[in-house]
Image (tube, rainbow, N blue to C red):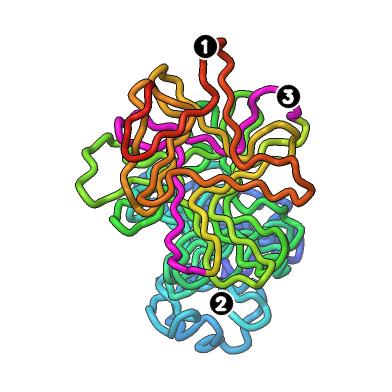
Amino acid sequence: MNPSIPLLLIATLISGMLQAQNIGINVNGATPAASALLDIDGAGLPANNQRGLLIPRIALTSRTTAAPVVAPAASLVVYNTATAGAVPNNVMPGFYYWNGVNQWLRMFSGHDAWSTVGNSGTTAGTNFIGTTDARDFVVKTGGSAVANERMRVLTGGQVVVNKATASAGDVFSVYANSRGGLNNGVGPFAISGYTFDGFGVYGDASNANGIGALGSNTSTTGGSVGVQGEVASRNGTGVIGLANYGSYQIPNGTSAVGVYGQVNGTLAATGQAVGVVGITDGTMTTGDATGVMGESASAFGSGVFGIATSTTTTGLPTGVYGLNNTARAAGVWGGSLNVLGTGVIGVGNGGAANTLVNGSGGAFSAANVGMYAVATNPSGGTIGAYARATSPTGTGLIAVGNNVAPTN
């Protein structure tokens, strides 16, 4: 070995530092780039014998432990050969650099980093964005402040928007203004669904005791609303309840209910509980505006059915209650569209209904008193029951006793 070669090389490097204040390492004598302190150029090497830069290889023990390097300088680069440490400060083989304060940071390679302009060659189930330890995955915008957190995927799999924790039973939850979220300025609508010809919001439950969609309001005072349906169309429907949409046969002893309304709890003396309320706008002072409408095509069906199950002898339970505030109108109105139909049927004492074969405005029957009429005006001149026939040959009232059938 010629000992003069290393000495000559050292002298050449020192001379380069003194004259150009940068160093070039090459085999063809090329001048180092002016912007580089150290310019390593292998262009002069044979094409089949190229070489690279070998970074020092050491075995780190933890991201937060400098050893085995003593007092590492900021940006010091090493190649870690060990898999060591405990989550979340564990290390694995790869390039690391010292942040100048308290930890080694892994330098991403092409297989580790996700590009901000898209990625290719990914494999579902292998490549992902998230965490590899038992830590939540957090998404923020606008900075690292707590209020800037937008979404979090918890270690248990729950997804939460605008909150760092999930309520028991929630899989996906969104927190709007004043609902305990991280930012109360995000907006009042927790979830909004928009569609052109589909479903804005769709809920599906395949269990016999499941609920497709549930609206809950936990306020105990005020005019709170559990579910509200709105439509802007003049011919639209605010809420539709559809039961047995598969058109299956309904077994004996069971019921399919399109809309069900229930009020729980107890009532104070002046309280009022209403299972279902139907109200038309107060501006509809003319035309055919109906608060609640029921329709049935079944031979034994009921358009509207009301039942009072109380057996009290002191109160006044009512199956169907109608109230009117307009002169010469009716609190309850019953009509038949068939010429042989009956407008209103009333049955007392738990008996069977009796109607005229040619139909009537009202048919009332009971075991004791078929119809009872009382006028309560104390000033006199009132009539308990009034019957009138508009035909010249008609009869205003026919009363028959002793089980004699009337002339119809």
Q: Nearer the viewer, mark 2 or mark 3?
A: 3
Residue nearest the observer in this picture, 294 or 78: 294
Dot 3 falls on a residue whose secondary structure is: loop
Write down the region rendered in magenta. 284-313
At a point 40% along the width and 24% down the height, the residue shown is: 359
Q: Could you give the CA–CA distance between mark 1 and mark 2, rounded to whole angstroms?
A: 109 Å
Q: Could you give the CA–CA distance between mark 1 and mark 3, rounded to whole angstroms?
A: 35 Å
Quarter of the image for residue 405 reads top left
State the image coordinates of residue 83 (x, y, percent, origin top left). Answer: 38, 78
Q: Amino acid at mark 1?
A: Thr
Quarter of the image for residue 402 reads top left
| 123 sits to left or right of 35 | left
Q: Could you give the CA–CA distance between mark 2 and mark 3, rounded to whole angstroms?
A: 79 Å
Q: Amino acid at mark 2?
A: Trp
Q: Main secondary structure of the magenta part?
A: loop
Q: Earlier in the sequence, mark 2 or mark 3?
A: 2
| Residue bearing mark 3 | 286
| Residue bearing mark 1 | 393
Q: Nearer the viewer, mark 1 or mark 3?
A: 1
| 281 sits to left or right of 300 | right
Quadrant where the C terminus is found in the figure: top left
| Residue bearing mark 2 | 104
Q: Earlier in the sequence, mark 1 or mark 2?
A: 2
